[in-house]
Image (cartoon, helix red, strand yellow):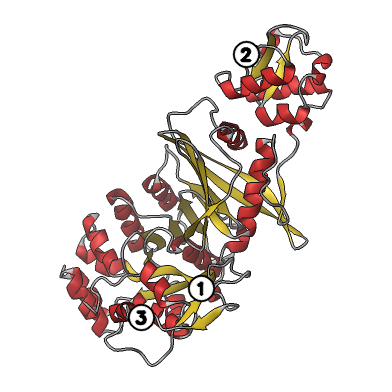
Amino acid sequence: MPDQEFTELSQYETQSASAGLLPLEFCREHRVAVLGPPDAAPLTVGTVDPLDGELLAEISRRVGRPVAPVQLNDFEVRRALSAIYGLPLGDEEGGSSKLSSAREIGFYPDQTPRKLLEDLLAVAIRRRATDVHLESYNRDVDLRFRIDGVLHQVSTPISPDNLGRVLSRLKVLCELDLAERRRAQDGRFSVQFEEDGETRRVDVRVTILPGLYGQDVAMRILDPKRFILDLERTEMSPALGERYRRLIRYPHGLILATGPTGAGKTTTLYATVRELHSDHLKIVTVEDPVEYEFPKVNQKNVTAAMGFADHLRAFLRSNPDIMLVGEIRDAETAEIAIRAATTGHLILSTLHTRDSIAAVARLRALGVPNDYLSEVLIGVLGQRLVRRLCTGCRLLEVPPEPLIRLYFQKPPDHGFWRGAGCDLCGGTGYLGLVGVFELLQPNEEVASAIGRGIPVEEIRKVARANGWTPLVEDALAKVGSGVTSLEEVARRIPPKFPLGL
C-alpha cells in the first residue's frame, strides 16, 4: 500500500465541481487531477509529470485558461480522482486493457493514447508479431512489427506530436518513471486478448531507450498461443528428436541450446522443461527475464542484486534435480554450471554460437578446463528458425543458379518452392516458423578430442566422421520437401564456405 501521508495533495481541497472541467477518461489516461477551486486562474493541476509541456498545453486548451502544475505521485492522483468523481479508490483505474482480434489501428483525430496503444497491440497480436518497434526520427515516427523474424513497416497515426502521450501511457502501465528521458527503462504489463470466442492473457515486455530525437520503444509480445511447449511440435527429425529425448533423461550433465538471438533456444528449453516436469523432480530456473510461467516450477528472474551466477550458487544449496540457466554469458556462471553438472545435477542452458561445435570454443574461452568439459558436456543442440512457406500460395520455381551453387555442387533431383503471396499470409509467401536442428552428442572419440584440447575445426571433422550432421543439411532437407525456400535458408543460414566460390 503506498504511503497515504500526502505531500502536495494534502495542501489542496479537491472539489466535485472540478469534475466538469476534464473528462474522467482524459484524467485516467494522462494521470492528472484538478486541485483547488475550479474557477481559479491559473488552474492548479496535479500531474505525475509537471515538465510535460505538451500535456499542460492540452489541459490549458481544454479548460480555456493557463494552468499551474503540481507534482503528485501516482497514488495521489488516483486518490484525487476518487474524491472528485465520487468513485471508490481503485475504480478510477478503469481496469486492465481488453483487446479484440477485430480491432484495427484507428486514424481518427483526438484519439486518446490508451485507445491508440490498444489498437496497435490488438493488430500486432492478431498478425502474430513477436516485437513492436516505435522509432522516433526528426520529422516522423516509424512503427514496425516483427513477424516470423522479419520486420514489416506499418502505417501509424503516431507522430512526433503525440508520441510523448503514448510514451507516458506506456510508462504508467509499466510503473516507470515518467520524468526519466535520459536513461533506458524496462518494464512489463499484461492485456486480455479475445480471439475466436476465447480470451487469453498476453504479456508485453517494454524497453524504452533515449535517442537523438526523443525516446524509442521496443515491445516484446509474449503470447502463450505462440509458445511451442511440446517437443513434438518443434519439428526435429524423428531420429534427432529421439536422441535428444534420451539425452534429457540423463541424471546429470550439461545440455546446451546454441544459435544466434531469435533462433528459438529458449522455446526449445521450455519444451524440454515441460517434457521433464514431474512430481518426482525439482526443477529450478533463472532467466532474464521469465517469459513463460510453469506451474510447480521454481522460476527466478535475474536482477541487479542477483545475476545468473548468484542464483546458481543458491540453487546448489537447495539441491534441485534440474537447473535451467537462461544463458551462460561469463566465466563465473560457466564455472558454477560445470561444477553443478559434475555434482549430480542436469544443467540446461544456452550459448550464442554459430553452431553446436562452436560451443566447445566458447566454453574454453570462458575458462572451462578441457578435461571438465569433456566429462560434463553430454549434448549440444544447434538450431535456427526459418520461415515456413504458405501452403495457400506456394509454387514450384527454380531459384537463381548462383544461389543453388552456394549449397549444391550439382543441382539436386528435387524441385524448389517459393511463396507467391496471398491474403492468408499477408502477401509475404510465408506463414509461421519452423526449426532446423543439429545435435552434437559426444561419443568416446569426440569427448577424447575435446579433453585433449585439439582445435575446434579438428573436432568438427572428428564429429562429422562419427555421425554429426550440420544443421544446414536439415534446412536443405526441408527445402526439398517444400517446407521452406532456398532463399529463406540463405537469409538465415548463409554458408561459411560457399560451395560455388
Q: Nearer the viewer, residue 328 or 215?
A: 215
Tell me how far mark 2 sits from mark 3, CA to CA: 65 Å
Location of the N terminus by quadrant is top right
Q: In this rendering, would 349 be left or right of 280?
A: left
Tell me how far mark 1 sits from mark 3, CA to CA: 16 Å
Label 3: which residue? Answer: 473
The amino acid pointed to by label 1 is: Arg
Q: Which mark is residue 478?
A: none
Residue at x 40%, y 50% (from the top left corner):
312
Q: Is residue 468 visible?
A: no
Residue at x 40%, y 69% (from the top left corner):
383
Label 2: which residue? Answer: 70
Residue at x 42%, y 37% (from the top left corner):
305
Label 1: which residue? Answer: 388
Q: Earlier in the sequence, mark 2 or mark 1?
A: 2
**Quadrant of the image occupied by residue 61:** top right
Location of the C terminus by quadrant is bottom left
Q: Residue furthest bottom?
A: 413
Which one is closest to the eye, mark 2 or mark 1?
Answer: 1
Classify 402 as above or below 280.
below
Classify 158 as above or below 244.
above
Residue at x 67%, y 26% (from the top left corner):
31
Looking at the rendered structure, the secondary structure element under dot 2 is strand
